[in-house]
Amino acid sequence: MSEHHKENFITKYVFTQDHKMIAKQFLITGMFMAVVGMLMSAIFRVQLANPGESSILYNLLPGAWLNDSGGLNPDKYLALVTMHGTILVFWVLTAGLSGTFANFLIPLQIGARDMASGFLNMLSYWFFFIATVVLLSSLFVETGPASGGWTIYPPLSALPQAIPGSGTGMTLWLISITLFVVGSLLGGLNYIVTILNLRTIGMTMQRLPLTVWALLITAILGVLSFPVLLSCGLLLIFDRSFGTSFYLSDIIIGGEALHNEGGSPILFEHLFWFLGHPEVYIILLPALGIVSEVIAVNSRKPIFGYKAMVGALLLIAFLSFIVWGHHMFMTGMNPFLGSVFTFTTLLIAIPSAVKVFNYLATLWRGNIRFTPAMLFAIGTVSAFITGGLTGIILGDSALDINVHDTYFVVGHFHIVMGLSAIYGMFAGVYHWFPKMYGRMMNKNLGYLHFWGTFICAYGVFFPMHFLGLAGLPRRYYSNSAFPMFDGLSDINELITFFALAGAIFQVFFLFNFFYSIFKGTKATQNPWKSNTLEWTTPVERIHGNWPGELPVVTRWAYDYSKPGADEDFILQTEPLKEGEIEH
Amino acid sequence: MDIALRNTVKKQLLWVALVSISMFFASMLSAFIVEKADVVNWKVFILPDQFEISTVIILVSSFLLFFIKPLLKRGKSIFGLVFIVLILGILFSYFQIKGWQQLTNEGVYLTGIGSNVAGSFLYILTLTHLLHLVGGLVGLCISTIKSKQNLYSINNYLGLELTSIYWHFLTILWIILFTFLKFY
């Protein structure tokens, strides 16, 4: 592990144990899944705009998914919504984001040769890869993939005969998510132990870049919450395959009374959301870590309130474990308990506000460079604020009940979790692309990508709040059966227009990404003039990161525009001058 | 990475994994508590005697593992000791299975028309513990072979140390599960 060594194609690109290559494997797989998930959303948005009509986009689907007139079958609409949610939440924003940047940045930013266990790291990716194959294979099952929503609530998920997607598709979903969780846990163990043990000389916890803090706390969240999803899934597997009754009771299906009694689907919700809410922060915190770095670098200013930022991350992580009940206000929960969950949920606004304030304070009077990465980082903060505000409404049990399961919820979580995290991911890709591939991405295409995405994303998700306030339920195949929603069809069409336009703008990103890997301008060693250790490694990738001795750290990561310094950045390895006080 | 750091790293990887496994069982027990509070026809049953025997066995096995370090310090062979622990581990598994037999004889089933959520939880909790124990048995098998070949010394017995930590964890976990199932 210590030095660069000779590699063949298999050990370099396939069964690699080099954290940087594993990061790229996560990124490419995540991007592929993002395209699949995005196409699914484009297809079901077309259905919502033109219910029951045929579309050229449907040519991407198997023929059995369509009805005689060429329209999308209702059960396959549900399958697309379910798979879109599953893919985006787990495959793109969990593994694609965390897997990429934890693998890439942790060893590089703490000054380590590699992860604590290269082998476990490799296994982590391959579990993820096999999970991907299993999930995608469910698209080709006769009865279709899982269709009960990404939250797979029983009894739909527990009874194979419930709906077409409850059969083999659901079984494959469960196998796939089990493999996914195993992969995530292996990765999480590695991240935590690497950060705690393999920091180079001088890299104290107080000198860690906020990206690493965010990735550490994310890994802790994963290690604590993913096993709960595993136990939740295990009980579900027993219910659907072996006839237990953990989640089932008093069910008559197809005129037949089932033997199951004593179980409760609400138990599933408790277990699922005990993972589910920390999962929101497993998605969000890495993005916030990336944004901290990108904003500081491109504002040419130290991050404002470093300790408060770390404290806010810790507090958000802690609170994320005691708020799961806000997803369950409609389950007949005791109103007092509901008020407790309301209180704990609204408490999250405090550390969130600290983070937003500190980002804005960092930007304030900064010498801002509007690189594509910086635009996406600011976009993250913007989406975090916009989505966070509607979170206050949904976190309050009395208000949530009015908009439960409507498009208001869809709009909220897509902005606060989806957009924030995906913008953070884009910021990370644009920022660290030169380190990943030794070349620069095209700036102008980056700007086009940002503004196209930013406008279209708000065009999609902002109007959804109004649909929700008008009572439009989520997950419905068509709203044309309800005259009260007739007046909303124009908004639905508008949303679909923006969704399709937004998808087109992603083509610019994909082109820019792959073109730049081969034809982009060659990068210099430190193109953004950053302080952190990754920019002290050679441009060409080597296994072991630094050709000679490991760097020695003498200062924190945010000495930008420090008075008395020769330049507006000081590498973490540069010794303090005589009389210089560390930040 | 020097040897001391490598050993620390491997131990920490195991400790973090144990935290993760603990969360798995904590969620199972939480589910048990929630379900018991909700279910009207919760079946009350008596734990089979075999589980008490297996409790004593796993406690003894865990206790014996504490003698490994002193023996290695004195340069003595640990093969016999590790082998006995392995046998005790197998005996534990045997009595667990006998316990399940006893339960079915008394009409407590994992699944089916005659099953009850209470019984299903009992089987799932003990089954998942036993599945984790299989990992420990594999570790003990490897340690037994290595100790037979005298590959361990006081300066080099990390694999056995990791197996011991895992085994102690499984013992504590079983005591918690047993106490919970018996008295809750």
Image (cartoon, rainbow, N blue to C red):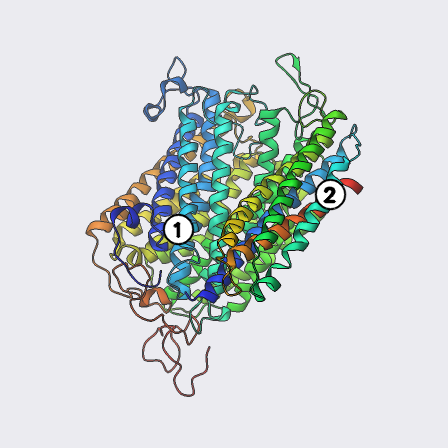
The disc placed on residue A53 is none
Image coordinates of residue A392 in percent, x first then y, are 60, 48
Image coordinates of residue A358 in percent, x first then y, are 50, 64
Q: Chain of mark 2?
A: B
State if disc 2 and disc 1 touch (CB < 8 Å). no
Mark 2 surroundings: few (<14), some (14-19) or many (≥20) residues within 10 A: some
CA gap between label 1 and label 2 equals 42 Å
In front of the other: A541 or A288? A541
Residue occupied by mark 1: A100
- Quarter holding residue A54: top left
Q: Residue furthest bottom?
A: A579
Q: Is residue A392 visible?
A: no
Residue drawn at 60 percent across, 41 percent down: A273
Residue occupied by mark 2: B178
Residue drawn at 39 percent across, 77 percent down: A562
Q: Is residue A83 left or right of residue B178?
A: left
Image coordinates of residue B72 in percent, x first then y, are 57, 63
Q: Chain of mark 1?
A: A
Label tally: 2
In front of the other: A151 or A374? A151
- Residue A364 vs B97, above or below: the answer is below
